[in-house]
Image: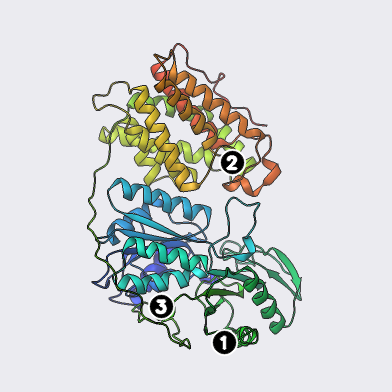
Amino acid sequence: MSHFLPETDAVLTAAHGLARAHAGLIEVHESPLYLRARDADPARRVGLVSGGGSGHEPLHTGLLGRGGLDAVCPGEIFASPHNRQIYEASAAAAKSDGVLHVVKNYTGDVINFQIAAERLRHDGIPVATVLVDDDLATDSADSATGRRGTAATVVVEKLLGAAADRGATLEELAELGRRVVGRSRSIAVAARAQTSPTTVRPAFDLDEGTLDYGVGIHGERGIRTIARPATADLVRRMTDDLLDALPDGPDALLVLVNGLGATTELELHAIAVLVGDELAARGPRPLLVVPGTFTAALDMAGFSLTLTRLEEGWADLWTAPTRTPLVLPRPTLDPGEPVPAERTPASTPARAGRAGGGDRALLDRYARTVTQVRDNLTRLDQLVGDGDFGDNLAGGVRRAVKRADETGADGTAALADAFLNDVGGTSGPLFGLLFQHLAAASPADGGAPTVAALADAAAAGHAAIHRVGGAVPGDCTLVDALAPAAESLAAARDADAPESPLTDAAQAAIRGALATASLRPRRGRASYVGDHALGVPDPGALAVALLFMALADLYEPATAPRLPAPGHITVP
């Protein structure tokens, strides 16, 4: 598959190809990229939106249309979509009762969908999220990230699509989705890695006669490499592991036998018989076995098994008719299930405008500081991540300066716009949320914001970032600088005439940022390098500290902390 991708705009070209192949079903919006169903069921009160990295087709685009999703946001290959894609797709797909996001549990997907949700709520659009985390291989108490989201996403989207067409409310759909996720577990194996689009070679090597057990859908290596057993023995082992991990519940099971891209229909149908017989041998239970390629990993040679315990009415939702590019098999469940209960009416959301505010002088000071330290932040990020943080931060600030110059926008408002809409990666949009809340703290007349307004803005920004990414102090992220700064401002707000509240907040942020050097990261890319991150302060936390330093320098120049000349941050 990846041997023949177009050299440029592969994802966009494929999106247009899907729309042409299913004329009348799908429309493509190019900037930002998302696909939208043309023919939604008029009974819908909620728009369903999903998305993720490309390379997993037919997920998610195969389920666009009646009985499925209203919009899909494809990222680049194995990369999360940008929050702007999700935000605009959701705004276009939202219905009277709002919009529901179906999100696979990967850091980039979660953060970008959460940022989009924050923006939608800011606009007055009700939004809820169903987080799919079904991968048994990543079920570890040591991980703050939790289980990955894999092929159970198909089950969630299909059941929610059918329920949405029956007029379910936002709250009902969110609860249904969470129950489906809670009753689903998956495990995957691979005999050959996917082909890298860059090198046109397998992404990793496996010795002859071995399998990787517990692989991910982005080509991640398995939790262990095993000697290759007979296929029936492999299916028995996978079934045992899934049943041991599956929460208690109804006996009725849906079994998704999913190919990872290069596994043939012949193999998948044979595996479906093996797993069906394996489950039937363990006791009588109604079974609904569905083979096919639904969630690929480019052209990986492997398959996954997903088990879902079916509550009353869910089998009926699975077999409900669809009008989507992907035609899902519709085996019958014996005994049949009754239709879900009728739904209650929905309300129409109010849509609010955006808050403004900010100060151009703060933008200029922050831009000057970031320019000074960009290379040092990049070198720090190379030690713990992928090395793009300094360039992303500086690029976002440059865009904000350009916006302010061209449009006359206030400084923090320009920063929020640039970082929310144009800066990719994980941390950029998170900074956008912080800037968005800080923009609301500046008075319309351009004067100095009050300590109370800044304290409320910092606390709101901290809360939004926590909702999106889940980070808390001690996780070695930007929150380790933001939380103490917000707490310092809150204390100053409640005190009698503090002498230098912004200086105190800046110093608290600096202490928090520097303290990250002693932490073992628990979130973000740095969490993947483990102890190699020890001794390295988190670049995002340092950038937050620099922001509060710029605030103090603007309004309390006599006491504000300074960068060491010529503005260097020490790199270990």
Labelled disc at residue 269:
1
- Looking at the figure, which quarter contains the C terminus? top right
Question: Relative to 151, is 77 above or below?
Answer: above
**For discs 3 and 1, the disc positioned in front in the rendered view:** 3
Residue 185 visible in image: yes
Upstream in sequence: badge 2 or badge 3: 3
Check disc 2 and give the amino acid type. Answer: Asp
Q: Is residue 148 left or right of residue 91?
A: right
Mark-to-mark CA distance, 2 and 1:
45 Å
Label 2 sits on residue:
475
Q: Are marks 2 and 3 in contact (CB under 8 Å)?
A: no
Label 3 sits on residue:
313
Residue 333 locus on image (x, y percent): 47, 86
Using the image as rendered, state which of residue 291 and residue 130 is in the foreground.
130
How dense is the environment of label 2, judged by Cα within 10 Å: few (below 14), some, or many (20 and up)?
A: some
Q: Is residue 363 left or right of residue 372?
A: left
Residue 388 locus on image (x, y percent): 54, 43
Name the colour scheme: rainbow
